[in-house]
């Protein structure tokens, strides 16, 4: 498209735009991602577990290059393979993939994704997990594993499509496991299942590997009431010696045990006309359980009425602290899920088969690992240390640049008026000389 776009005048001068700029990029931040890969070799490790079954002499694009192309594309905001019809000739993306020629076309990337097997997905998931724990220089004193599920709405006729009453849509029901901001697992599931399905199997594998690495580290499972299952709780406490704090659905028996505390909250609300929260704990045994367990209850009263809440736990400590600080801390994992789904496109599950949609979720999980490295390591001393991924992308990675190159070097000429020079220096791994 080389025609001019006329945009009016200023001081009798025409304002025009066209796409004849030549070697320019709007994604100079890709060079920072290239540096991150050079330092960590993260995506190289991922590529190493995907077997090469193509004819060697006919290979133009390695699986390593294709993974970088897709993951770096996601980070820069390009969620579709179709975006690479033109992006494949972007010099910044080429260099981030360690190439100087055209990258994979959309059809080549599609064939790559469709060639992934279930065994490949398992190996990739394990490799991501192993990479995350290997980055810890010292054994952590405590690890809190946040389990949560979410919905990914389906707009086509994909495999595993089912209607979910709670979300009022046809969707998938993925399982996420986070350790703080670190994504340990992203498992795609159909929505016609119990919300806790496959959670215990995944938990056992994670606990096994964590204990092999750090035998003395305290491990805590934190989850909402969708994961309150007797079998899992029993195995956690008795077989694996794991602490847990899990939401519990309210029922009439629990409400009776909380009545005295709720009455106190109601009385205080009558006096102050302000929201009241009182906390207590008690022993409780459901009909299907073989033993009593500790339940922490929250008696909350507002102008809208009573709002009793419960969590089941084997942890010691003050009920209010356990509920407000320990349990409610799981809200942070919900923010992490929003990041990966809305900002790094793990909800882009438009492939026909659920297996290939699972691989797309893994690509997004890889993108999270890279962006979290940038945020927590390179940008730690900047004002972007707590910003979400879309802010980092918009302010620091989506940077325009003129590209000048010859047989000896590439030079990216960034805007002189850029307001975030120091932060971009940090992202590239350098200290500002300003």
Image: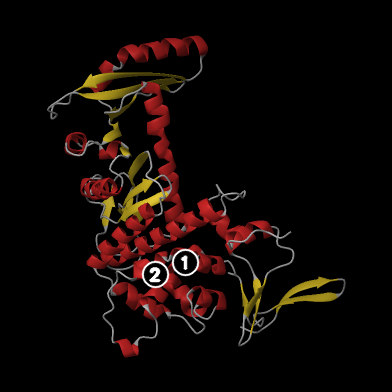
**Residue 293 x, y percent position in the rendering:** 21, 25
Specify the quadrant of the image occupied by residue 368: bottom left
* Near-viewer residue (132 or 336): 132
Instruction: Count all numbered tags in the image, as a single digit.
Output: 2
Specify the quadrant of the image occupied by residue 223: top left
Task: Label 1: state its secondary structure.
Answer: helix
The quarter in which the C terminus is drawn is: bottom right
User: Looking at the image, do the residues carrying marks 2 and 1 touch, with CB atoms under 8 Å apart?
Assistant: yes
Q: Residue furthest right?
A: 11
As drawn, 355 above or below 153: below
The numbered mark at residue 44 is: 2
In the drawing, does residue 262 fall left or right of residue 398? left
Q: Residue at x 80, y 76 (%)?
A: 14
Q: Is residue 79 visible?
A: no
The numbered mark at residue 389 is: none
**Residue 240 x, y percent position in the rendering:** 20, 39
Q: Residue at x 44, y 23 (%)?
A: 304
Specify the quadrant of the image occupied by residue 234: top left
* Near-viewer residue (163 or 410): 410
The numbered mark at residue 37 is: 1
**Residue 349 x, y percent position in the rendering:** 35, 63
């Amino acid at each position: 498209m080389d025609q001019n776009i006329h945009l009016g005048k200023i001081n009798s001068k025409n304002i025009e735009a066209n796409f004849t700029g030549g070697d320019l990029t709007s994604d100079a931040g890709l060079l920072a991602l290239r540096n991150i890969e050079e330092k960590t070799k993260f995506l190289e490790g991922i590529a190493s577990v995907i077997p090469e079954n193509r004819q060697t002499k006919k290979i133009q694009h390695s699986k390593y290059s294709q993974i970088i192309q897709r993951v770096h594309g996601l980070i820069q905001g390009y969620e579709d393979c179709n975006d690479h019809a033109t992006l494949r000739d972007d010099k910044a993306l080429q260099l981030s993939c360690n190439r100087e020629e055209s990258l994979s076309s959309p059809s080549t990337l599609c064939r790559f994704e469709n060639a992934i097997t279930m065994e490949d997905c398992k190996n990739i998931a394990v490799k991501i997990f192993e990479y995350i724990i290997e980055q810890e220089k010292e054994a952590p004193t405590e690890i809190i594993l946040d389990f949560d599920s979410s919905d990914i709405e389906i707009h086509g006729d994909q495999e595993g499509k089912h209607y979910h009453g709670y979300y009022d849509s046809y969707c998938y029901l993925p399982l996420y496991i986070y350790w703080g901001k670190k994504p340990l697992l992203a498992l795609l599931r159909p929505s016609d299942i119990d919300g806790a399905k496959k959670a215990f199997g995944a938990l056992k594998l994670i606990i096994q590997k964590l204990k092999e690495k750090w035998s003395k580290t305290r491990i805590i499972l934190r989850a909402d009431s969708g994961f309150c299952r007797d079998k899992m709780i029993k195995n956690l406490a008795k077989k694996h010696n794991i602490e847990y704090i899990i939401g519990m659905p309210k029922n009439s028996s629990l409400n009776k045990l909380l009545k005295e505390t709720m009455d106190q909250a109601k009385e205080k609300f009558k006096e102050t006309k302000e929201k009241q929260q009182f906390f207590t704990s008690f022993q409780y045994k459901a009909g299907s359980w073989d033993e009593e367990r500790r339940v922490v209850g929250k008696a909350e009263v507002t102008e809208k009425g009573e709002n009793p809440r419960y969590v089941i736990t084997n942890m010691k400590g003050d009920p209010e602290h356990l509920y407000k600080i320990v349990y409610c801390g799981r809200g942070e994992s919900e923010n992490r899920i929003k990041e990966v789904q809305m900002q790094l496109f793990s909800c882009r599950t438009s492939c026909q088969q659920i297996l290939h949609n699972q691989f797309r979720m893994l690509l997004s999980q890889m993108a999270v690992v890279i962006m979290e490295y940038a945020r927590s390591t390179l940008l730690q001393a900047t004002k972007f240390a707590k910003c979400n991924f879309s802010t980092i992308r918009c302010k620091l990675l989506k940077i325009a640049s003129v590209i000048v190159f010859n047989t000896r070097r590439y030079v990216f000429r960034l805007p002189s008026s850029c307001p975030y020079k120091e932060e971009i220096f940090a992202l590239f791994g350098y200290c500002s000389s300003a």
